[in-house]
Amino acid sequence: KNEVEQSPQNLTAQEGEFITINCSYSVGISALHWLQQHPGGGIVSLFMLSSGKKKHGRLIATINIQEKHSSLHITASHPRDSAVYICAAGTGNQFYFGTGTSLTVIP
Amino acid sequence: DSGVTQTPKHLITATGQRVTLRCSPRSGDLSVYWYQQSLDQGLQFLIQYYNGEERAKGNILERFSAQQFPDLHSELNLSSLELGDSALYFCASSVEGRTANTGELFFGEGSRLTVL
């Protein structure tokens, strides 16, 4: 069993749709990160959360510490949102990555 | 541009060899992290340095070592290379680092290592 699990693995959406990617973790955490990796390989940090909710543009990230669950929402999705979204969580030496959610947004 | 610079971008070498990957963090960032992304294991945390000292150690093999220099750049040394070491190696930096992996992370573009 992976310490950090994401769902779905793959997601195809029409432009404009509301998208949710889920992340569940089984380890104790100091922080949870949502990362975006584009086809070229580069990684961009979208959010770092330790509690509550954060919003940046069309992206919203939430975390429920009691349920050990986080969600990444994309409102009004756009083809440029097509990427792999990776959840990562842990503390200290114990830091784990999910396997990623591959998102394709079709025009 | 994240402000984190990694060199080289691509590296091809043979089994048994040794390579050094270099990372320059964003100006002002004290923490440097190293991550490995391979096809079969995904992303893994290797090691973190904060202001020159090792702060956290993840799944780093004994054949691998890292250090952070007084100017805060870091090097990841990979020795006795095996085919399975072929991967993308990412460096990230953050301002914070007292608790590992809790600061906002800024990633370099990665160094792609191919071991033949």
Image (cartoon, rainbow, N blue to C red):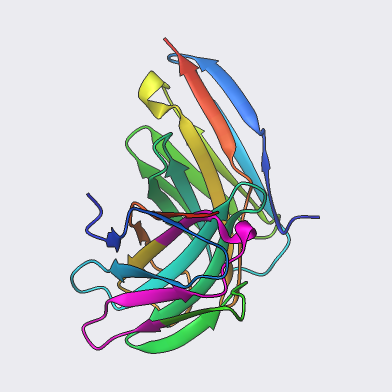
> What is the tally of numbered marks visible in this picture?
0
Instruction: Inspect this view and state whether residue A18 appears.
Output: no
Residue closer to the observer: A33 or B61: B61
| Residue at the extreme top of the image, as rendered | A107
Give the x, y percent position of residue B44.
58, 61
Instruction: Inspect this view and state whether residue B43 appears.
Output: yes
Which quadrant does the C terminus of chain B fall into? bottom right
Q: Is residue B14 magenta?
A: no
Q: Is residue B27 shown left or right of residue B7?
A: left
| Residue at the extreme left of the image, as rendered | B27
Q: Is residue B84 magenta?
A: yes
Q: Is residue A76 above or below residue B76?
A: above
Q: Is residue B92 above or below residue A1?
A: below
Residue closer to the observer: B107 or B36: B36
Residue closer to the observer: B39 or A85: B39
Residue closer to the observer: B43 or A85: B43
Q: Is residue A99 above or below residue B31?
A: above
Q: Is residue A72 shown left or right of residue B67?
A: right
**Residue at 24% in and 88% down:** B70
**Residue at 38% in and 45% down:** A42
Q: Is residue A78 shown left or right of residue A68?
A: left
Give the x, y percent position of residue B67.
39, 84
| Residue at the extreme right of the image, as rendered | A1
Figure quadrant of residue B106: bottom left
Q: Which residues are magenta?
A: B67-90
Give the x, y percent position of residue B20.
39, 72
**Residue at 50% in and 70% down:** B17
Give the x, y percent position of residue A66.
69, 60
Figure quadrant of residue A100: top right
**Residue at 58% in and 78% down:** B63
Q: Is residue B42 above or below residue A51?
A: above
